[in-house]
Amino acid sequence: MKTNIWGKTALFALVAAAVLVTVFPFYWITNASFHNERLLYNVNDIHWFPDFTYWVNYIDIFQKRNFLRNMLNSFMVASMSMLIALGVSSIASYALARIKFPGAKFVLYFVLAISMFPAMVIISPLYFLLQKLGLMNSYAALILPYIAFTLPFSLWNLTTFFRKLPKELDESAEVDGSTPFQTFYKIMLPLVAPGMFTTAILVFISAWNEFLFAVTFISKDAFKTMPVAIVGMPSDYDVPWGQISAASFISTIPLVIMVLLFQKRIISGLTSGAVKG
């Protein structure tokens, strides 16, 4: 009995420590964003609680740094990447899961193999390709690579969902005279809605947070996304920690709200594809 209690206590302590390590950075940027930068450098008098009457850092990033434009750029790139990747992967995954044709498994494993290449390995060829196509410093310079990198995950995830649906659905639709495409968007698509929703959110988050491609393919301020704008805030003589914290807080809040609002659907989508329906 005592061993069981000590085991639960140890497990609780580990979980509490993991939560603390995970939450503390977000707490600290929130705290720092609501303080004067001079206070942040004073190690002898650390302020542990935000001063919610101090909004200078938030005002400065919108008035002096045009951070609203960076937010719109991130939203545009993430939204377009999500919609296109989801549209392509939903049709492709339906074909791979429900329609028998030679090489279906090969396509899936080939896509999986491609996704294993680190972004750093292919960033140079991508750079020269986009440069030759004249797409540098444009939304397309980010949307196209984001689609390519999120398609494998979307394809595998949605293929799993389509495979879990009973085959009788296809047979009944075929008897009723439906074409494969009609069966797809009238019958199958509504049934895999949880998987579509989960995949859409995860693809959006991936594109929203992406940094390497954004900092490599975009040099003009008009097209910079939030991660690139935040990294570019420090100068040779100054590191505006207050503004950096405020910008980081703002870039994180939409994702936190999205996950909190749709956590049930996300969990439902992740779990329903793992069990046979």
Image (tube, grey):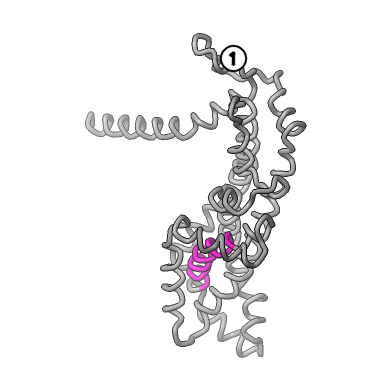
Q: In this view, does 142 lie above or below 100?
A: above
* Main secondary structure of the magenta stretch: helix
**Magenta region includes residue 148:** yes
User: Residue lying furthest top in this view?
Assistant: 44
Q: In this view, does 160 lie above or below 255?
A: below
Residue highlighted by disc 1: 39
Local crowd size for mark 1, using a 10 Å CA cut-off: few (<14), some (14–19), many (≥20): some
Q: Quadrant of the N terminus?
A: top left
| Residue 126 position by quadrant | bottom right
241 vs 272, left or right, is right
On the image, the x and y values in percent for residue 240 come to 62, 26
Residue displayed at 77% across by 32% down: 63
9 vs 122, left or right, is left
Residue displayed at 58% across by 38% down: 231
On the image, the x and y values in percent for residue 100 come to 49, 86
Q: Which of 97 and 277 is in front in this view?
A: 97
Q: In this view, does 249 lie above or below 133?
A: above
Disc tally is 1
On the image, the x and y values in percent for residue 111 come to 46, 70
Question: Taking the image as drawn, is residue 241 in sight?
Answer: no
Question: Taking the image as drawn, is residue 66 in sight?
Answer: yes
On the image, the x and y values in percent for residue 64 come to 75, 31
**Magenta region includes residue 111:** no
Q: Which of 91 and 265 is in front in this view?
A: 91
Q: Is mark 1 on a helix, strand or loop?
A: helix
| Residue 94 position by quadrant | bottom right
The amino acid on which the numbered mark 1 sits, given as a three-letter code, is: Leu
Residue displayed at 61% across by 88% down: 174
Read off the magenta span: 145-162
Q: Nearer the viewer, residue 87 or 232?
A: 232
Residue displayed at 46% across by 77% down: 107
